[in-house]
Image: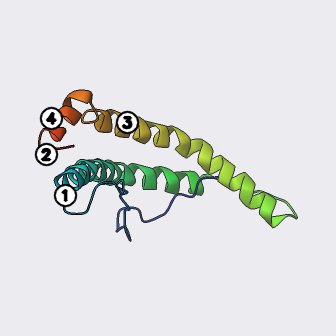
Amino acid sequence: MHHIPWHWHTSYDSIDVYIDKKYRPGSCQYNSVLDHERQHVVVFLDTLDQAVPGIESRLRNTVKAQDSVITDDQKLGIKILQARIEKVLKPLMRKINKRLDVQNGAFDTVKNYKREQKNCLTW
């Protein structure tokens, strides 16, 4: 089961970006990779900012529309409710991931990588 935070849009504690240790911090290559990865972070945050209202609305409506689950096993009851909610949210998550793939793919191209590498005398 995927955990979907209720307050995605409020803030992030941190988003970690990993850069190969062969690039020394402050070097041209390091800064070029960091700038490229920042573009991915911006795409991620923008996509979530646009998607969160729809996700929250769909989640609230789905939760309100749920029928009762009658069981002696609390864990089973929770799993059943989570599965119902996940079924509704999965198509939204696929749509978000598809959008991320398209937008990230727009600057993850050979042409763009070659242009970025030209920014540094050595690579």
Q: Which of pointers 2 and 3 indicates the residue nearer the eye?
A: 2
Q: Residues within 10 Å of mark 4 (few under 14, many from 20)?
A: few
Q: Secondary structure at mark 1?
A: loop
The reply to whether discs 1 and 4 touch (Cβ–Cβ < 8 Å) is no
* Residue for badge 3: 101
Of all residues, the one furthest to the front in this rendering is 122
The reply to whether discs 3 and 1 touch (Cβ–Cβ < 8 Å) is no
Mark toward the start of the polypeptide (3 vs 1): 1
**68 vs 97, nearest the viewer:** 97
Which disc, if any, is residue 115?
4
Q: Secondary structure at mark 4?
A: helix
* Residue for badge 2: 120
**28 vs 68, nearest the viewer:** 28
Mark toward the start of the polypeptide (4 vs 2): 4
Q: Pinpoint residue 70: horizontal percent, then vertical percent.
A: 82, 59
**99 vs 109, nearest the viewer:** 109
Between the residue at mark 4 and the residue at mark 2, the CA separation in whole angstroms equals 10 Å
Question: Residue at position x 61%, y 42% from top?
Answer: 87
* Residue for badge 1: 27
What's the residue type where badge 1 is placed?
Ser
Q: Secondary structure at mark 3?
A: helix
Mark toward the start of the polypeptide (1 vs 4): 1
Q: Secondary structure at mark 2?
A: loop
Of all residues, the one furthest to the right in this rendering is 72
Q: Is residue 56 left or right of residue 82?
A: left
Mark toward the start of the polypeptide (2 vs 3): 3
Q: Residues within 10 Å of mark 3 (few under 14, many from 20)?
A: some
